[in-house]
Image: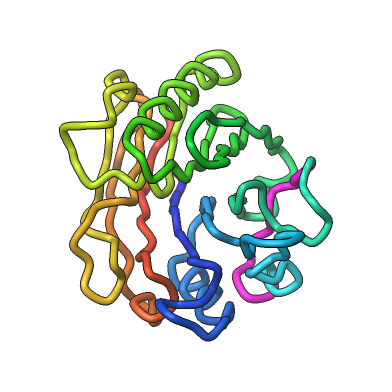
Amino acid sequence: MLKLASYNLHKCRGLTGPHAPERNLAVIRALDPDVIALQEVDFRYGVRPEALPRKLIQAETGLVPARMNGTTESSLGWHGQTILMRPHLAEQASLRRLPLPGLEPRGAVALRLPGLTIIGVHLGLARSSRRAQLARITAQASRIAEDHIVMLGDFNEWRDDRGLESLAGFRVIAPGPSYPAPLPQLRLDRMAMSTNLDLLDCGVFTGAGARDASDHLPIWARIKLP
């Protein structure tokens, strides 16, 4: 059994600032996931320095970031994304980057664990881009993974009946409104999992000051592998 989560950090600036990563770390610590996909972990411009300081992650949350290649030394993630996990899982994990099409630079990160592949996503703002990106992700997943797959992240899609056509073979889970954090109205953060995985529980996390730490609330799910 694993507790998975996804959290868009909004560069650790809350809604409007200031930069205060300790708030996001407190949310992750209270959420207590086994694996969490993070979005917007780096600042956007220049060398894209980390917004979430890697030196604080394990001490504050007990988790470690996946080993990331192909990014700058000052960046924590790739296209602003990384995956944190418990140290014993990191010993067995490998990470792969998945470039994505679209009007703006985007990419997904695929974490391979024994018996499970977890793909962190942050899809584009245009629905046409999101459709192309999901088509690319599902095609790549069928090549790099077995039949135990979970995609999770900021899908940037507020509709349930449009834009998710490529996920027809998956169980799509939108635990509840997660954006904007102070008064959430939109279910932008979602998961899509293989139908042979058992979903035990899921939700949107509002504790530990989450409404102030980012513009998104984190989502979570407990799953059981066959």
Residue 107 drawn above or below residue 58: above
The residue shown at (56%, 83%) is: 20
Q: Which residues are magenta?
A: 59-69
The residue shown at (38%, 41%) is: 223
Q: Quadrant of the C terminus?
A: top left
The residue shown at (70%, 74%) is: 56
Left or right of 105 in this view: 164: left
Left or right of 107 in this view: 184: left
**Front one among 226 and 87:** 87
State the colouring used for the structure image.
rainbow
Residue 117 drawn above or below residue 199: above
The residue shown at (51%, 77%) is: 13
The furthest residue to the front: 103
Q: Quadrant of the N terminus?
A: top left
Question: Magenta span has 72?
Answer: no
Left or right of 161 in this view: 105: right
Tell me the quarter of the picture where residue 100 sits.
top right
Residue 178 drawn above or below residue 139: below
Q: Position of residue 138 (x, y in %)?
A: 45, 21
Tell me the quarter of the picture where residue 177 sits.
bottom left
Q: Position of residue 131 (x, y in %)?
A: 36, 28
The furthest residue to the top: 143
Q: Position of residue 32 (x, y in %)?
A: 48, 64
Q: Position of residue 168 (x, y in %)?
A: 27, 20
Question: Magenta span has 61?
Answer: yes
**Front one among 70 and 115:** 70
The furthest residue to the right: 73
